[in-house]
Image (cartoon, grey):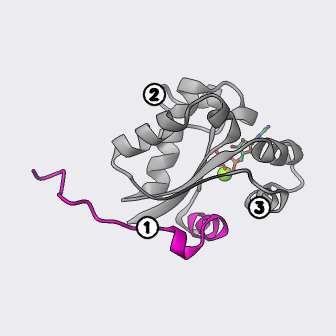
Amino acid sequence: MERTLVLIKPDAVQRGLIGEVILRLERRGLKLIAAKFLQVSQELAEAHYAVHKGKPFYEGLVRYITSSPLMAMVWEGPNAVAAVRQTMGATRPTEAAPGTIRHDFALEVGRNLTHASDSPETAAQEIALWFKPEEIYPWERATDPWIT
Ligand code: RTP
Ligand code: MG
């Protein structure tokens, strides 16, 4: 079982796509175990995107992510990291496969709607950065949907 951090970035919130993103992840079979709606501070944005510091798009990326509220979530499931990135599609929307969120709803890499952790190790770091342990609520499904 894996966990992954998902951000519904400010452009997706502004465009009314929160439900669309959650719908696709829920329908895929992943489980939502933590969620919060917030306007991201400069410090959190810089910590989250520390790996991109110095790249030409870094300043614009931090401005984008702090510009307006976003939704941060933790999703859990088998192979959750790879599954969520597949549902999001390639970073550049014009390279994303049809049927993915970025293909279906985006055009520009700088407004690509979502973030998803890129490995289980990154996911653990990102989840710890965005959520306190007591804000995460693992839960069990009441019945097994695969065998009934
Ligand atoms: P994310 O971290 O947001 O899930 O996206 P990713 O792994 O697919 O892409 P990554 O390389 O980590 O880049 C992080 C975010 O930076 C923006 N970006 N802009 N202008 C550019 O060339 C450029 N490259 C990346 C995107 O918003 C990307 O999601
Ligand atoms: Mg990334």
Few, some or many C-alpha atoms within 10 Å of disc 2 (few <14, some 14-19, many ≥20)? few
91 vs 139, nearest the viewer: 139
Q: Residue at x 53, y 68 (%)?
A: 135
Q: Is residue 10 above or below residue 73?
A: above
- Between 122 and 143, the one lying in front of the other is 143
Q: Left or right: where does residue 37 sit relative to residue 1?
A: right
Identity, as a three-letter code, of the amino acid under mark 3 = Leu
Residues 91 and 125: in front is: 125
Residue carrying label 3: 44
Identify the mark nearer the N-term, 1 or 2.
Answer: 2
Write down the region rendered in magenta. Answer: 122-148
Secondary structure type for disc 1: loop
Whole-percent x, y for residue 58 in the image: 85, 48
Q: Mark 1 — residue?
A: 137
- Residue 127 lies in the magenta-colored region: yes
Q: Residue at x 38, y 52 (%)?
A: 30
Q: Nearer the viewer, residue 81 or 62?
A: 62
The image quadrant that residue 33 belongs to is bottom left
Relative to 108, say whether 53 is above or below.
Answer: below
Q: Residue furthest bottom?
A: 133
Q: Nearer the viewer, mark 1 or mark 3?
A: 1
Q: Secondary structure at mark 2?
A: loop
